[in-house]
Image (cartoon, helix red, strand yellow):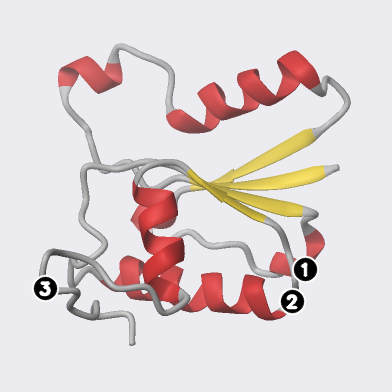
Amino acid sequence: MHLAVLMTNTDESDFAQAHPKDAQKFADLIHLVRPDWHTTAFSVKDGVFPEDISAFDGVMITGSPASVHDAAPWVAQLGRLIRTLHAQSIPMFGACFGHQIIALALGGKWGPTQRAGPLG
């Protein structure tokens, strides 16, 4: 099993720098129960996306202090990638920001007024 870990965490504070990055945290958790599984990390928040998402058996999308409504180009690109993953039936898991953007990219609404997001 080979999983892509899409890192979305934009926190670059001193506190964040003093601790393992999300990709390492997710890999460590996976290896506790599935030591033979492999992960490859992509810093999507920096515009680094997998070239061929079909090379992976599944995708994990990390948390972030960013908003799924941010106008940053990587947020929209991630939304498009999520729709591709869904169309190709590639399993996805999202943590915090990750599950919010999955829901929004696949047609969910957000907020007290149930407004649609910028992902289209």
Residue 113 is tagged as: 3
Q: Which residue is mark 1?
A: 54
Query: Mark 1 Cα within 10 Å, few/some/many (few <14, many 20+)?
Result: few
In space, the residues marked 2 and 3 are separated at their CA atoms by 31 Å
Q: Position of residue 86 (x, y in %)?
A: 64, 73
Q: Are marks 2 and 1 in contact (CB under 8 Å)?
A: yes
Q: Position of residue 74 (x, y in %)?
A: 34, 67
Quadrant housing residue 56: bottom right
Q: Residue at x 80, y 45 (%)?
A: 2
Q: Residue at x 70, y 58 (%)?
A: 91
Q: Are marks 1 and 3 in contact (CB under 8 Å)?
A: no
Compared with 59, 90 (above or below) is: below
Q: Position of residue 30 (x, y in %)?
A: 69, 25
Amino acid found under the numbered disc labelled 3: Thr
**Who comes first in sequence, dot 1 or dot 3?**
1
What is the residue that sits farthest to the left in this orientation? 113
Q: Would residue 34 be found to the left or right of residue 113 on screen?
A: right
Pick the residue in front: 65 or 107.
Answer: 107
Amino acid found under the numbered disc labelled 2: Gln
**Who comes first in sequence, dot 2 or dot 3?**
2
Identify the secondary structure beneath mark 1: helix
Identify the secondary structure beneath mark 3: loop
Query: Mark 3 Cα within 10 Å, few/some/many (few <14, many 20+)?
Result: few
Pick the residue in front: 109 or 93.
Answer: 109
Q: Which residue is mark 2?
A: 88
Q: Position of residue 37 (x, y in %)?
A: 82, 32
Of tags 1 and 3, the one toward the viewer is 3
